[in-house]
Amino acid sequence: MEKPSLEKLGWNSFFEQYLGKTDFIPARIIRKHNSGYDLACQEGVYYARIRGKLRKDLPKEQWPAVGDWVLCTLEKEYAMIESILPRKSKISRKVSGKTSQEQIIAANADTIFLVVSLFEDFNPRKIERYLALIAESQAKPVVILNKVDLIEDAKPFLEEAEKLVTDVPILVTNALKAETLAVLEQYTNKGQTSVFLGSSGAGKSTIVNVLLDAGHQKQTVNDIGKHNKGKHTTTSRDMLFLDNGGILIDNPGIRELRVWLDGDEALSESFADIEALAQECRFRDCLHDMEPDCKVREAIKSGVLDQERVDNWRKLREESLELLQKRQEFGRHVDKSQSNRLAKWTKTARKKSCRRGLR
Ligand SMILES: Nc1nc2c(ncn2[C@@H]2O[C@H](COP(=O)(O)OP(=O)(O)O)[C@@H](O)[C@H]2O)c(=O)[nH]1
Ligand SMILES: [Mg+2]
Ligand SMILES: [Zn+2]
């Protein structure tokens, strides 16, 4: 049994800087169970639990997620997680229901592939929602328009998708034809962690399997992960190791994708086109509603901008605002700049509601 090097697990200078002098062992969470975790370190793969003290100190929403680097001690049969290293990125969603709880889907991803089926799943509003989530994560988004074999013409979809993004690569694939996935390789290089997001049935696991099969060298890290053997199907979130050193995290379809946004920066990034137009509106606090000289409304009128995209932008902002308010109510930490923005939004939202006779 070959032991994984830290590099093979995705360790790099970012995490090194936080290591300092310690007797604890750096390890990466490769799987989450109901009762604990599997983690991989230079000594091998271990079942792990969070040390009681840490469990008490950390709010549950901050507990380790797949992809996290932790420091641990090794007992004979299992490992104890002592602390979590700072995250390079994290992709989160809001827990379903009436809570303000964050759920980390995966940590320390370099690239997040958003897999969309062109056949049954192409919905610009849903794509925007995902992209806003990814923008918040600090990882680099790549959109995969999959199942191109099942549609007549991909061009209109591609054009539509291009309207939703700036500087985000869009790949068109047929996961049943491995050659079309070769374009993904530039993102799945040695030590790079990629997360696959998207609706159930979009083709994530199929793509992951093709990439796993595409390995040319002999298996190394995969051997130690017993659950990595054979065909991969998503039961829980798994981390998978490619022979070229790339690291993949497949995700089960997310049924309800409530945004988890810690402010409006991610939204500004995802909706840069609208934000840029809004800068040009006559009034600084323009709601793009009835105001004269509104560039956003002009763009909608002239067909440059979709009304639905603007509506979705509003909706996501409102969700985000609601979440921040809930977090403040529950006394969760909301930093100063966020609460300033919140105050501004609240004012804006109230104004808007009055004007529209809502609420
Ligand atoms: N025709 C076609 N079928 C695909 C493609 N990609 C995936 N599938 C099929 O779509 C179904 C769902 O794929 P799966 O990878 O399980 O989706 P996941 O839920 O996103 O992991 C499976 O039956 C796949 O064989 C594709 O590009 N073209
Ligand atoms: Mg799957
Ligand atoms: Zn305006």
Image (cartoon, rainbow, N blue to C red):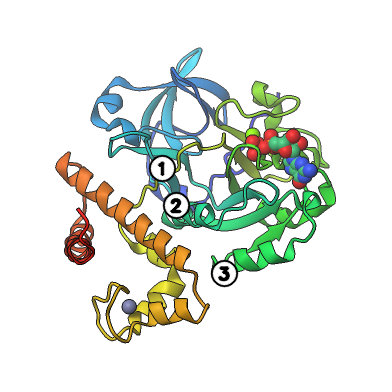
Q: Is residue 170 above or below residue 53?
A: below
The Cα–Cα distance between marks 1 and 2, rounded to whole angstroms, is 7 Å
The tag earlier along the polypeptide, 3 or 2, is 2
Q: Which residue is mark 1?
A: 93
Picture coordinates of residue 107, whole percent (x, y): 47, 43
- Mark 1 or 3, nearer chain start: 1
Circle 2 residue: 133
Say which of marks 1 and 3 sits in front. Answer: 3
Examine the rendered structure and indicate whether residue 358 appears above or below residue 18: below
- Residue lying at 53% horizontally and 21% vertically, measured from the top left: 46
Q: In front: 271, or 217?
A: 271
Q: Quadrant of the N terminus?
A: top right
Query: Which mark identifies residue 163?
Result: 3
Q: Is residue 84 above or below residue 347?
A: above
Lateral position of residue 292 relative to residue 247, left or right = left
Q: Amino acid at mark 1?
A: Arg
Residues under numbered marks 3 and 2 in contact, where contact means CB atoms less than 8 Å apart: no
Q: Residues within 10 Å of mark 1 (few under 14, many from 20)?
A: many
Q: Is residue 192 visible?
A: no
Q: Quadrant of ligand 1?
A: top right
Tag 3 secondary structure: loop
Find out whether the residues at labels 1 and 2 contact each other: C-beta distance under 8 Å: yes
Helix, strand or loop status at disc 2: helix
